[in-house]
Image (cartoon, grey):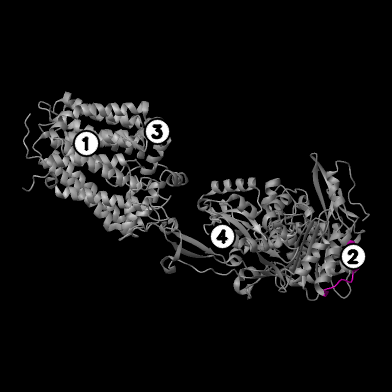
Amino acid sequence: MRGSFLLFRLDGLSMFLIVALTAFGWLNIYSTTIEVDGAAALLDLTTSHGKQLFFALVALAAMIVLSFIDEHLIKRYSSISYLFGLTLLLGLFVFGSTIAGATSWYDLGPINFQPSELMKLLTALAMAKFLSDTGVSLQRSTDQFYAVLIITIPVLLVLMQPDPGSALVYLSLFLVLFREGLPLYYFFAVLLTGLTFSLTLMFGRNALLIGTALGFLTYFLIRPKKKKRPPLLFDVLFPLTQLGIVALTPWVFSSIFKQHHRDRFSLWLGLESDPEKMLTIKQTIGYNTYQAEQAIASGRWWGKGFLQGTRTKGDFVPAQHTDYIFSSVGEEWGFVVSALVILAFVGLLLRFVQLADRQKQAFHRIYGYGVISILFIHFTINIGMVLGLLPTIGIPLPFFSYGGSGLFFFLLMCFIFLKMDANRHKTHFN
Amino acid sequence: MSRLLMSFSIILVGMIFIGRLVSLQLFYTPSTLVESDPAITKEYIYPERGFIYDRNNELLVSNQAAYDVMVVPREVRELDTLAFLELLNLDREVFERRMKRAVNYSTRLPSVLVPSLSKERYAVLQERLRRFEGFFIRKKSLRSYHTKSAANVLGYISEVNPSDMRANPYYIAGENIGRTGIERQYEETLRGKKGVRYIQKDRYNREIGSYQEGALDSVPIMGSDLQITIDKTLQEYGERLMTGKRGGIVAIEPSSGEILTMISGPTYDPALLVGRQRSKNYTEMYYDSLARPTWDRSILAEPSPGSPFKTLNALVALQEGIITPNTTFTCYDGFYVYGDKRSCHCGGGVRDLISGIHHSCNAYFAETFRAYYRNFESTAEAHDLWTTHMKSFGLGDFLGVDLPTGRPGRIPDTDYYDRAYGPNRWVSTYIISNAIGQGEVAATPLQLANMTAAIANRGHFFTPHLLKAVEGRDVDDVKPSLTQRRNTTIDPKFFEPIIEGMEEVYLQGTARYLQVKDIRIAGKTGTVENFTRIDGKKTQLTDHSVFVAFAPVEDPKIAIAIYIENGYFGARYAGHIASLMIEKYLKGSISRTDLEQRMLTKTLEHEYAKPLSGKPFKINENAW
């Protein structure tokens, strides 16, 4: 009978896109890390591409194990798993090993394990569990508070490592809250806060104080008279917060930010007026982005061909097999394939949205949105950074970037969701 | 709305990314794309720098090859340090220090590891160095001099520094640029233009050919050979005569403005500023603040012109009808300014213009000067006209000579004295020292030579210049602005009595012992008082010896000005040298060997030592 075997019930389009992206990503890791002297064995664990392939196989094994575990069990244990994840994050402060200034790894002999990758999955699950509980409503502020807490705890813990990239990933779970009924004006409030901060840096405090005040006045005068309105608290507090942000921005920028943060903002917003200093920033802080842009631009329509990239090879684009892997796609494969990769990501995400929306169980749907949010933020920030649209924030491109923990949990996260979808017609009995 | 937020965001981000890809990959070619591509190597092809010849096509400057061992730190792999050091005959310590410096400079760009190998060492190393990755030999072209003279005219080249590269993006590190003299003035002509070849490499760093079939390549443009107006023989001879003396000599061909010699003493061998020793030698000379060999006295020294200036004052007075050649003044072994006697050494008595010149009578010219100013309503009006006349001889002006340095000298104008004394608060007696070429006027040896050429030409001169031809094309074609004729404001007919007086200087005046057989020379001695400060006290030093002359009188071929610091009276050092150089230039040999012997053996070092001795000293001693 068709559909009796799990593999055939998994969503075909999603499976195809995930496998294709992972395989293509692996090819690019191979291309960027392959030694000049020639090809090494595929599963040679001393090479990056060998390790990556190994982790893909491990992920496959884990999926097979998982396919025997009922979703119901996953739901049941999601809260306790979340606490376990938090413990792992806390444990880093005692047992963690420091790589590149961040205490984010457990040293397990041959491999390093990064618990924040696992925690992404666990937080999504815990969030789904909490929000799908009967009686929880995001219209209620206590529940809003709990939901926010689930996200904020791991955010704070990874910020202390410090790993701001991962923190941003957890924050993306707020997107789930909006889908599940958190009023949208929070969303715009956050968006506006970021905008206010950036604009203050660009145009100065006084200009923005006046501008913001005028902006809010105009808004109150011309806004439509509607019955459904944000609470009064919001009306008063929000403008005041914005003005506060404007007032505090220069202080935060000069006292809280470290020099390298300042440089990144200077680069992104073009804050430095001295052209010589700006050039120095471009050549040092902006070096990666600059090299990546040049590499991508040099790919033109059809690219230089597999293994023929000259810029992404060797030392020119640092981190080119991890965070900057997309620059290799741009250089060696050109515009057509790069655009196809972006379309594949967009297609996969939209398909996931479709799948999530057709889930009958709230837990499945919310978890699905969690997965989408996490993939989406990774995709947006990573490619935005490589294309020079966003400041440098080091997070990997899902399925593409070299990194065992990352690939393993991305695959697992997606598999869990696809399995939920495959079993959506099953009825569960407690 | 909430449900659509996610899908909407995903599509928006996807669209932005694809838009960015379109703009990056399809529409935008960053100007730096080729430059920054590690797989495209830019190889420069340097044209040979042009040679420099003298006016008789004698080679002055050519090129010689030198070889540097270069290193690209990034490309150094598995270096067998021991074998390498042995091959290059290098100390480990030196090697490590230089490698460190190279890494600090750039890991990707070549740095010099061992500079300036000889040709023989190069032959040995060339093959064997191949075994060591990251090292290569760069051929470099150095200047080669075929004369030990004219360092001040030729100038020198050296590697560009960061500020040169900022000022002119043509230059990149390691290239040479002309620093002074002809090398700097005609840098672009001599240099030519480097060519460039873009070479495509594959990812194994192997060259696979020309990038885009050479679409971006450019061929080098050869540097042009220059012929300059300097006479090598005369220049070398003059520098020999200047041994042990400080001062400047400039000789000009009056009929063209071509500079025949331009000598500054003390000078140095131009070969000192070539190659590895350049920096050390230059520093040594630059900090010799007493002799100042790098300071070109022929165009930078601005002493008072002294008595030769009297000829110009006479010309102004003739032009304005103040005197005629027959006008006489009486010299009382001096003249009086407000009852204050200023002395004169001419012997005294009644002087006319011609005897005033050849006896260099101070009184005669002081009276003429006074008479000139009395002829006008106001001193300022008189002085304005005087200034115009003087400036028409190229004084108080850079003259437009084709050298990167120079000084304007000084013809003090009305403004100058208004500032010093206040408007209408000065009269001719205040400035009467100018009558005899002392006081506020100042002129470089070049200006004095040019002024002499104007007298020789009876009222005009050609802009003095050094360029004679570029690649066989005459300067009139290449740069006509250099050879412009300029007329003085004095009528040609007034020059004859002056020239007669100057010829009398040789026949019976101050230079009568310096005559040269068969050559009619017109000259004028100058003895210039000068002062220095010792321990803050103004102290007079032995007079500067100044001489201007041109010859032959009937058809002037050479006009010369000589200025010898502390050489005492004009006929002494400067006069001797003038006669010798004129004879050398016109006849090619020296008959006055007595003068020559004296000039080659006498030095003025004892004069230059006096103010530094810390003891009281005598000036203007008569003994040689």
Say which residue appears at 20% left-offset and 44% top-offset: B9
| Circle 4: residue type | Arg
Q: Element under label 3? A: strand
Residue on which the image places disc 2 = B595
Q: Position of residue B386 (x, y in %)?
A: 71, 59
- Dot in front, 4 or 3: 4
Q: Are marks 4 and 1 on the same chain?
A: no
Proximity of marks 3 and 1: CB atoms separated by less than 8 Å? no
Q: Position of residue B346 (x, y in %)?
A: 90, 59
Q: Callout 3: residue from which chain?
A: A
- Dot in front, 2 or 1: 1
Judge by depth and name the residue closer to the eye, B572 or A42.
A42
| Circle 3: residue type | Thr
Say which residue appears at 68% left-offset and 52% top-offset: B279
Residue on which the image places disc 1 = A188
- Dot in front, 3 or 1: 3
Judge by depth and name the residue closer to the eye, A258 or A71.
A71
Count neighbours of disc 3 (C-alpha within 10 A) and say few if under 14, some if 14 to 19, many if 20 or more.
Answer: some
| Circle 1: residue type | Phe
- Whole-Å distance between the Cαs marked 4 and 3? 43 Å
Residue on which the image places disc 4 = B130
Count neighbours of disc 1 (C-alpha within 10 A) and say few if under 14, some if 14 to 19, many if 20 or more.
Answer: few
Judge by depth and name the residue closer to the eye, B4 or A351.
A351
The mark nearer the N terminus, 4 or 2, is 4
> Which stretch is magenta?
B587-598
Residue on which the image places disc 3 = A98
Quadrant of image for the C terminus of chain B: bottom right
Judge by depth and name the residue closer to the eye, A56 or B381.
A56
Tell which residue pokes out farthest to the top in this image: A142
Examine the structure image and report whether residue B407 is included in the region drawn in magenta: no
